[in-house]
Amino acid sequence: MTAQRINPSILSADFVNLQSELEAISTADLVHVDVMDNHFVPNLTMGPPIVERIQGVSPVPLDVHLMISDADRWAPGYADLGAYSVTFHAEAAEDPVALARALRARGARAGIALKPGTDPEPYLELLPEFDQVLVMTVEPGFGGQSFMHDMMPKLRRVAEARARFGLDLWLQVDGGITVDTIGIAAEAGADTFVAGSAVYSGVPEERIAELRTAAAA
Ligand code: DX5
Ligand code: ZN
């Protein structure tokens, strides 16, 4: 079986106690950090200074998900501050390949994200330039939404392209991942699972363990 990763999203954490909320998910593979600009999505979260502090105290490396416009300008800074992976949305970059190369040159994994309405086809031939693909299973912007089952054909399509190119590409899903939906996404080809409300609505360490079990079932 391929490796499976659980990346809790701190969007559902208590922002006033971020350090302890980060320590509570020390058994995670990566910490998913949702950056929103109230332009690409209708919500606003945090920017580089806060992410840099999170990077400084987190026991687990960061998986930064940029839901921002003008990714060409902002994404490299997240790689420079030490993020393990930096994912931008396909529509948010003028030149996705140049940006992926800039991220890799800075030592980060480069990710491309596909919103529910984004056709994956134009991006499949670019996959060798990336280390991970994020297939959104909700409309980006908010935690606590329901998993979109109708994204599974897209996930399968990307998984097929990954196999065709023989790539070591992580296939990530984000939105509505719970113990009930994680197996469905795994079956469609996902190996990296973002979960916000499912992790922070209970004891995070227990929730992470339950998600791991459900993903492997
Ligand atoms: C939504 C964010 C997600 C969000 C997931 O736009 O990208 O990472 O935190 O939250 P849940 O797991 O609650 O759907
Ligand atoms: Zn996210």
Image (cartoon, rainbow, N blue to C red):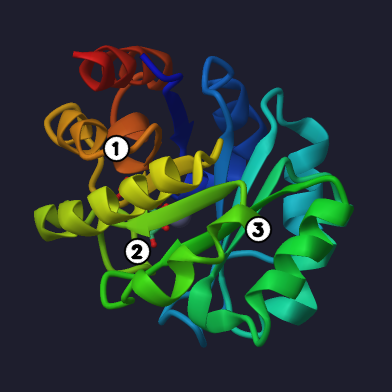
Number of marks: 3
Mark 2 vs mark 1: in front: 1
Q: Which mark is residue 142?
A: 2
Give the structural element (helix, strand or loop) at label 2: loop
Q: Residue at x 51, y 87 (%)?
A: 39
* Residue picked out by circle 1: 189
Q: Quick one: label 3, few (<14), some, or many (20+) residues within 10 Å?
A: some
Q: Residue at x 35, y 12 (%)?
A: 209
Looking at the image, residue 104 lies above or below residue 27: below
Q: Mark 1 belongs to which amino acid?
A: Gly
Q: Quick one: label 1, few (<14), some, or many (20+) residues within 10 Å?
A: many
Q: Residue at x 82, y 64 (%)?
A: 102
* Residue picked out by circle 3: 129
207 sits left or right of 181 in the view: right
Q: Mark 3 belongs to which amino acid?
A: Glu
Q: State the residue in front, 201 or 145.
A: 145
The CA span between labels 1 and 3 is 19 Å
The CA span between labels 2 and 1 is 24 Å
Which is nearer the N-term, disc 3 or disc 2?
Answer: 3
